[in-house]
Amino acid sequence: MKYNRREFIKTGGIVMLGSLAAPSFLGSCSGSGKIDQAAGIPFALNHFGVSENDLKKVLSAALEKGGDYADLFFEHTFRNSIRLQDGAVNQATSHIDYGMGVRVLAGDQTGYAYIENITLDEMLKAARTAARIATGSTATNTPINLTEKSILQDYYSISTPWDEIAVKEKMPYLQKLNDKIFSLDSRVNKVTASLSDSTSHILFCNSEGLTYYDYRPMVVLGATCIMEENGRIENSGAARSYRMGAEFLTDEVINTIAKQAVDKTAILFRAIMPKGGEMPVVMGAGGSGILLHEAIGHAFEADFNRKNTSIFSDQLGKKICNENINVIDDGTIPFNRGSVNIDDDGVEGQKTYIVKDGVLASYLHDRISAQYYGIPSTGNGRRESFRFMPIPRMRATYMEAGNVTEEEIISTVKKGIYAANFTNGQVQIGAGDFTFFVKDGYLIENGKLTQPIKDINIIGNGPKALADITMVGNNYEMDNGSWNCGKDGQSCPVTCGMPSALVSKLTVGGES
Amino acid sequence: MITQQNKKLAQWAMEYALKNGCQASRINLYAGSNTSFEVRDMKIDRLQQASESGMNILLYVDGRFASYSTNRLDKKELERFIKEGIEATRFLAEDKARTLPDPSRYYKGGMPDLQTYDSKINSIQPDDKLGLAMSTCEEIMGKDERIISAETSYSDGDSASYIIASNGFEGESSTSSFSLVGSVSIKGENEVRPSGYWYDASLFYDSLIKKGIGTKALERTISRLGQTKIKSGKYPMLVDNMNASRLLSPLIDALYGSSIQQNNSFLLNKLNEKVLGSNVSLFDEPHMIKAPGARYFDNEGVATKQMSIFENGILNTYFINTYSANKLNMDPTISSPSIITMKMGDKNQDQLVASVNKGILVTGFNGGNSNSTTGDFSFGVEGFLIENGKIVQPVSEMNITGNLLTLWSNLIEAGNDPRLSSSWRIPSLLFNDVNFSGL
């Protein structure tokens, strides 16, 4: 349930193989560079060195103990990163991950096994391990013919694949980012910057005959900045992340990140730790979506609700907040870090209203929970990699804009906090207590922003906080930082967004 | 386990890299496997099994450095991988500080076995593993009418690593792990469904606690019923031995050479100064037998040794690896601590509770963070209000806020009860004057 901002300084390094048209292990692939989603299954089968017949054999083995359903998830991922420190791009890291997982369902029970060496024998072995979740002695389901499902909407169609860009072509962007940050403020003392890209080839097929191929790009560019003023040191940072190719790299994005990193660090020198306690909190536009992610998003994930362990388990169809509030979890925003063409259960990406006109409209479903509730899945079945089974996960979670200005919202608060930037948050699904850490913000005194504040945790209870949202601004913003969501030991890329909003009461950390 | 065949592959990869333009290299080959049986309400919920292996190759080429890893352990693919890696590394900026450790610092072997691997791991039957998850679940089911759900799991696994460096290091290590977890959700007032858990973990199957995990999980969950927040104020804070490490972790992070070199540490320029309370002494004791975290060498192959980290509040060492040492022009120490121990007091948690007039026992953290350059922190907490030496009320939805150096200077007393299943052996800790924000 942790929701940590990716520590890009730790993902360091970089890329590989600059001048190659295709990454190393695509030797068996006929195309070079960009792979069209439509090239699909034949490409993917060839890439993973398996035949349609192999897949059917493995699916049969997976169901030989009487399982109801089985799927196979093949993944080949290339991750590269380059890192700048002390003024020079002097570290590169590359990682190749390759393997497949077999999942067998018997009712809502799951058997899962994965392998890294994709041969028919190994796949059959994994299938028989996963099959043991079912306790029958004979197969009751046999796989039908595999039918290719085309990706109807490609939300991350790219023009320049990362494997077409040489290391030496990427390096100047980090150098520019470094130089820009130093040029903006003489107090800047150290900068680290990193550019990480990844490209995944996914082949999926299941015992219902559905087969698809998905090409998933991702990029994160970020910088941290250390500043010193009169012997005092502060640090902060900024990042942008999208499902995009190398066309992402522009001077504009460099300038945006540089300015944000410097602004966020500089303000800390003027900031104080406020007095703590219960008070109104105005959530600024953008990253405040972390409130939705923690206060309600996780508790709406249908695995918790089918087990009846979420604080929202009995609230479907009930009014839970102001009727002007609409909250969405969306997998269809072009190039968004949280977007999915098709989820890891084989369901198309979609836009799901979780709160509509103040009413809890839908949980976030994967295959198992959708079957439990007898409704179509919302396309939220996601997994970190072939090493994991899919579970309900958020995508891009945001609140629609309201109709007042941010100034009007602030003007109603006599004494409170304005929360601007965040680093991480967490929630207890059943108790409903959630928290988020405010890196910087302001005191609100008599309707105006006054003294900057920093480094405080805010804690609240999900249903109460939602019901306490009394004003929603007209300034909706998506935060395209490098958010990662953790659950059950799996990490997933997500985003969040929000217009400015007033929560009438939350507990703010601080001096007593 | 690392096979002889894969060891040979690593040795071949090293030779291949050196022949093709790389002047120095370190290779880390890893392998591991794990199984888990998860039970929900006396029914198997999830069964998982896997094994994996891969190779991490560090290349030092013409004064430049890069790190490449892959789980494709095929000689032909590795050839291309290494050649292309060397080419790509040449594009980077030169960094003279990137070197292998001085060979004199490597672990040379000859010490007794640290006994971190249980060879029994491959002979435990799946039915026995499932049986443990089931019996733990049985301890919970039907014991209270408010129970919504009981989830338990048994997991085990092993991992092994084989490291070779081109200037003369070869080392191998392996470890096993076993764990049993019980978690419970119960119906509270209104829509609230408190949950809680308990677990044991061990390197050895025979020493894993197999009874009472479910019972304890249920007790802990029921004790949370009726949680409320109390008035903001400065109170003594007792943190239990499951959570005390959370307050140590930012102190340890501030000691890494990478943090020091980047001026990103609130303990910058504090070596040999008294920065914590006189009653705070912390050590790295890497050579304990049968202990999680025990090791003779770090990830660079450098020999580990017993070290004092803080003694009577005085900072005695940073964790300086080869790169940071070169950059900072300091003597290297070790890449990271292995087993952290703390000078203990003579009271267990109950005795510490009894010593508190009015304060809060923290039994769980909920989010929060700290500032790496100033040491300021703010964390969400839950636990219990203590009055007159007795636990009187569960509390939640509160924050603690302050500065880590002030906090650790206000340590009243350390307990005598560290959990030995963790490599950080930190007992219950009692601090004075902590800012709690609530009502």
Image (cartoon, helix red, strand yellow):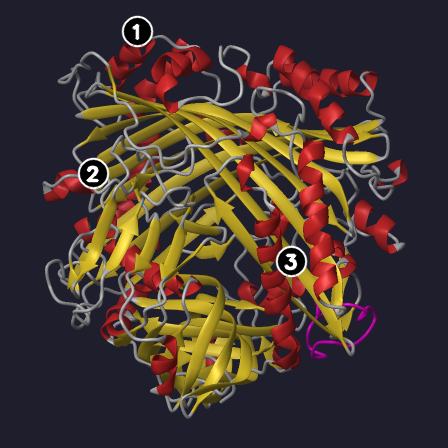
Classify mark 1: helix, strand or loop: helix
User: In which image quadrant can residue B215 be found?
Assistant: bottom left
Residue B354 in sight: no
Q: Which residue is mark 1?
A: A53
Q: Chain of mark 2?
A: A
**Helix, strand or loop at mark 3:** strand
> At numbered mark 2, what does the secondary structure look like: helix, strand or loop?
helix
For the question of whether residue A123 can be seen, the reply is: yes
Identify which amino acid the numbered label 3 is placed on. Answer: Thr
Circle on res. A224: 3
Q: Is residue B386 left or right of residue A303?
A: right
B283 vs A397, left or right, is right
Image quadrant in which the N terminus of chain A is located: bottom left
Give residue A197's position: percent from left, percent from top.
Answer: 56, 37
Mark in front: 2 vs 3: 3
Location of residue B307 by image quarter:
bottom right
Stretch of the chain drawn in magenta: B263-282
A39 on left or right of B318: left
Residue A134 on image: x %, y %? 21, 26
Residue under numbered circle 2: A368
Subunit of label 3:
A
Which residue is located at x 19 percent, y 15 percent? A143
Q: CA distance from mark 2 to mark 1?
A: 27 Å
Label 1 near label 2: C-beta < 8 Å? no
Please name the predominant secondary structure of the magenta segment in the image: loop
For residue B267: magenta? Answer: yes
Q: Tell me the chain of label 1.
A: A
